[in-house]
Image: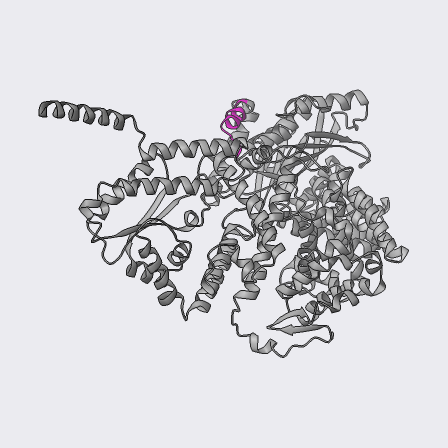
Amino acid sequence: MIATDIFEDNAKLSQSKNITLRHESPSEKLKKRKNKLISDFISGKKHSIMKFHSRILDDYFIEKFKSCIVDPAIDIAENTYTIIALGGYGRKEQCIHSDVDLLFLFEENVPDEAGDLIQEIIYPLWDIGLDVGHSTRSIKECAGLSGEDLVILTSVLDARFICGASILYLELMKQLREKVIKGQSDEIINQLVKSNLQRHDRFGDSAYLLEPNLKEGQGGLRDYHTMLWIGRIKYNIRQPRDLEYYGCLSHDEFRLLKKALSFIWNVRNRLHYIAGRKCDQLYFEYQTELADVLNLRKQNGLHPVEKFLEKLHSRMEFVKQQYLMFIGEQAHKKNSNQSKKLNIQTKINSLKVKRDMLNFVSSEAIPDSPDLLIKIFEESARLQVPLSSEAKRLLKEFIYLIDDDFRNSLFALKSFERILFAPPTTIDVLNDMLSTGFLSQFIPEFKNIVNRIQFDEYHLYPVARHSLLTVKTIKKFGTLDKNKTGNKLYGNLYKELSNKRLLLWAALLHDIGKGEPTGGHSQRGAKIVKDLLKKRGFKTSDIETITFLINEHLLLIKTASRRDLNDEETAITCARKIKDVERLIMLYLLTVSDSISTGPKAWNDWTSALLRNLFLSVLSILKKGELATGEAVETVNKKKEEVLLSASSLPAKQELELLFKVMSPRYLLYASAHDILEHIGLYKKLGNRDFVWKITRTVDSNTRVVTICAIDRPGLFSKIAGVFTLNSIDILDTQAYTWRNNIALDIFKVKPPLDQIFETERWDRAEENLKSILAGELNLTKALKEKMSAYRPLGPRTSQRPIRIVVDNESSGFFTIIEVFAYDFPGLLFSITDALFRCGLDVWASKISTKVDQVVDVFYVRDFDGQKIDAPDRVLAIKRTISEVLPGTGNQQP
């Protein structure tokens, strides 16, 4: 009987072991459940993932706690412990690749065996690829560290009990409140707000960034977390909904905040999935794919990716505004200016200043006096006092009172213009008008450009924000540092204007045409604004000026960056279109502010100099009239006399006279006397060599001028351009002149090499390359092909703009102008100029500029006989030949 029992027991034990072997480990079970959860989320079976993800992690820790084999060694009766979720895991915001933050909390002392406990519970999670951060502390130690370190404090504020001795968790939270928070809540909140400001400086405003950080940027998830932390410190809130219960948010605000956060979390989880790792920076390379997985379609002229970014920016902007309102009400930061502002009072009876903020005395007065809705903004601008959160809520609530009668009233117009004209300060009233919805209600046409995004690497801000920034930039012109030449010019011109009001209206509305999908936005915007201003009773002459500025707001920047500024015909064409000095000044200031407010890729010293030179040329023509033939002859003769003065003897003068005869009239007209002398010096050094060159630093050292004197030969210009590409030297601008004695003068303005310490060596290498190419010793095409094969773009193309080739025979009387809109790559300029050479064309001048994320290369050309190219078959052949050297054209040209 006993033997039978032993046999049966052994059989049962063996069976039990086999079953154990077949059981999944807790970590394997977790991995399988997580993969299924992610699959369901991506396929659309589950619309939310974070709470489910947190739950399956909880299940893992609970199971491991129950079956822990280290517990006897720890002596759990004496060393009770609890497992606590921290941070995002504690908030149940566990995204796909979020870290798992844990606290193993012991009552008094952490036993030596705690390391074995960590190994048993945490190591399996590392084995399946989870990022787990853990700490092992006693209650006293954890509370003490929370009082010393803000990061630890905020992590513990989000603490959530998972399993173990719950009494330890409750004791920790009690000590946190009694020993850390009590009596220090205001100081902690001020530290949180200060920390947030530093974070915003580091990561930027997500509503203004091309690649926003969904978590850390302003308007990101961290702003919401800060609201939660402050709520927990001040009110001991248990769940996000308590923000509404304690009056921190209204019912609608909480509902909309929840909706905004849901969208951001959805994007964040999908970003994690696409990137295959924890990733909160929304890089360009992921944006198009995210738009596709969110099933967005082209709408109102917006590509899916632009629609996606519009939705995302609007949600993040809402989070940002809610955070700012919340902080304004909750933080109550003390500052040195507070006592000075306490005595500020408003002159409007139904408004009041309280706690340094402007508010309505009572909401009951607003329906009877809708004009208070704009008066409060005007008072904010006049007193330099921000609106309170309650005032912003009431503005949103009563926004419906702004109807056509309100919009078209003279009172509202004058009040709005006083706001528009108010000096730029830290209180940005126009921005408040936009964020509260007032601006788009007052100017309904503005609605279509709020959060409108242009998907490229060029436009930094949504269209409406860009428009407000353009206004602000113009108003700052009068307050800029006068030590800078550009600033001094802008400030003086702005002060000269007799009617700044028209310029500011044009700045506010210059991009309003981008709200509709068809046609050019400038022309469309001018039409929209014409109707808008008529309804508001503007004078016809004022409407004409404002609509002209809007219609032509790209004229100067396009001309400066794509046309030969040495050709007087360029300035004359602009002058004939602008006609009036005051209009020119307004258009120039609008162009400058528009470019500055677009972003750093639209404005730099080079663009500034080009634009200023064009402005001054057009201004001179408008003041003095177009240059007559007689004046041109006089200009050339004066230059000749100045050059001849440098001659020390009669033979030297005779030599110069001979050289004048071989110089082209265009060269003598546009080259300065100083440059002519320099070019003659190079010519004398040329001798029997193929070429000589001189590299000159500009005053600001930001560019180099490379002047090349060479024996002319077919394809010389493209070979020089190829050498610069071979040596990674970017070309900004070129001029090409040919003397009648077969001497070519090619002048290139270029960016200096990146490593300027070895700049001399770089130029020496480039010079040797050009010598070898002209001597037939180096195959330029092969060398460039090798360089281009090693080139890889930094990221995917952000735009779907088509590649275009435009042949213009109207803008110049002497040249055919060819514009090539293409995507940049090493060797682009060489490829195009080589194609032009094969078409039998000489390049006389070129401009290299940027249009959004495309390069625009512009060439002034004539054929080898000195004629323009206007025969349709030749134009077609030129387009086809250029198209063949541009990657990605798909034979779309001509």
The residue drawn where x is 79% and y is 46% is 525
Task: Give above or below for 375 relative to 677.
Answer: below
Q: Can you say which quadrant of the picture contains the N terminus?
A: top left
Q: Return the residue nearer the eye: 861 or 682.
A: 861
Q: Quadrant of residue 253?
A: bottom right
The residue drawn where x is 67% and y is 73% is 352
Residue 404 placement (x, y as % from top left): 83, 56
Task: Give above or below for 168 relative to 274.
Answer: below
Range of magenta residues: 782-794
Q: Quadrant of residue 742?
A: top right
Residue 139 placement (x, y as % from top left): 29, 59
Q: Return the residue nearer the eye: 704 or 17.
A: 17
Q: Return the residue nearer the eye: 535 or 365.
A: 365
Magenta span includes 466: no
The residue drawn where x is 67% and y is 49% is 595
Q: Quadrant of residue 715?
A: top right
Residue 384 placement (x, y as % from top left): 66, 69
In the displayed structure, does residue 788 sit left or right of residue 718? left
In the displayed structure, does residue 23 sit left or right of residue 397? left
Residue at the outermost bottom position: 343
Residue at the outermost left position: 2
Task: Give above or below for 209 relative to 358.
Answer: above
Residue 657 placement (x, y as % from top left): 73, 40
- Residue 201 appearing in the image: yes
In the displayed structure, does residue 1 sit left or right of residue 696? left
How is the structure coloured here? one colour
- Residue 748 appearing in the image: no
Q: Can you say which quadrant of the picture contains the C terminus?
A: top right
